[in-house]
Image (tube, rainbow, N blue to C red):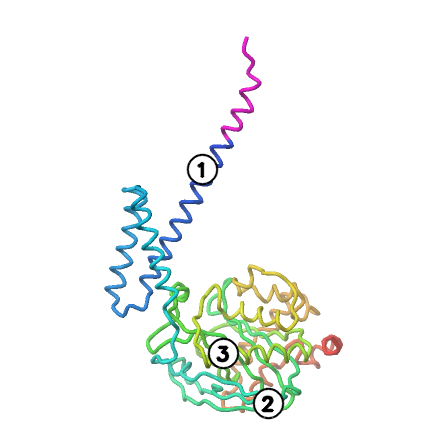
Amino acid sequence: MKSTHSSQPQGKRSFFGRVVVLALKTLRFLVLALAGIWATLALYYSNIPWEWARLALAVTFAGFGIYTFCLNKTRKMRIAYAVVFLVVVAYFIWIPAKMDRDWRPEVAVLPRAYIDGDNVRITGVRSFTFRDRDDFDEHYKEIEVSLDDLTSVDLFISYWMPGPVAHTFVSFNFENSAPVCISIETRPEVGQGFDPLASMFKQFELIYVVGDERDLIHLRTNHRDEEVFLYKLKTPPAAARLLFLEYLRRINELAENPEWYHLLKQNCSLNIVRYKNVAGREGSFDIRHLLNGWIDRYFYDTEMIYTTLPFEEMREVSHINKVTKATSVSLGPEEYSRLIRTGLPGHDLEKFPEFRRVDSAVAAD
């Protein structure tokens, strides 16, 4: 009489073996499919000047991949596919960012910073007057600020639609001058609009727009109909100065050597977090660094913004559209910035006196 006990473990091992094999095959399929899709898009969004040629190359490569892995599964064909794939990768890496394109006026001038001890002079500061999103008076100017006068940093979150994706940028506040607003953006050419997919395939250079808040904020709230929130960061003056200097370092790097914008690697929110790391932030990656429509909740949870109020109340009072729509763009930069902070936690200490104590504690850190 044969025992069945020894066959049960063997059956279990066989079942788990099949699961492992299936998982490995699935993983292999996903890797090959994603690599093929990436290379196809890299060809389509390459710097070949003729769209028909880029489309033809992309379709040909995709067809070659399907033929290789679905119809002619020989080792020789797979080697040939791998060689072509590596050529596409090498070509994509080679595509250089450029300085000399037909830029849109809003990004035509790169800022540059000149640092002499505590004195900072910044050229190429945008100070446009917008009548509509595409109707404006162009004006770039030069400003001077002192690092000794830098007191705090504000975070702006701008939503063009409700959801987990937004645009984030910062302002550095000074005692004796208007805030210096810095927005990390794409640098589109004339006739070019933002495309999230294209931005991952070297379609936009990177720019740090330095400008007046009455330019960058007024444009978003009054003409693009974006919803904008303003939060004061819990940043001691010494850390604020380190953060500002890090921004200036990157501004000067881009003035010398252009770089590509990338939606997932070189974007507005990730760079803010990186520079906060330089200025003393501690912490690991959080998915809200990418899903930056939720980054105010992340900053609240990690106490990088003030937590004196419950989050939902803090978010409600930090919504600035109502006041910006009522604030005249004809005001000077300092007066405009002062008025849009009316009634905001951390700025309006008459309305929120409890923040005075918190501010004192932050400044003492």
Pointer 3: residues within 10 angstroms few (<14), some, or many (20+)?
few
Distance from Cα at disc 3 to Cα at disc 2? 17 Å
Front: mark 2 or 1: 2
Using the rendered view, name the quadrant where residue 280 is placed: bottom right
Residue 253 is tagged as 3
Depth check, front residue: 250 or 332: 250
Measured from the top left, where is residue 180 in percent x and y?
56, 84
Query: Residues in magenta?
Result: 1-15
Q: Which of the marked residues, 3 or 1, is nearer the chain's N terminus?
A: 1
Q: Residues within 10 Å of mark 1 (few under 14, many from 20)?
A: few
Secondary structure, mark 3, is helix
Magenta span dominant secondary structure: helix
Q: Is residue 208 magenta?
A: no
What residue lies at 45% left-to-right and 65% top-to-bottom? 263
Tell me the mark number nearer the camera, choosing from 3 and 1: 3
Quadrant of the rendering where the N terminus is positioned: top right
x then y, percent, for residue 227: 51, 72
Q: Which mark is residue 22?
A: 1
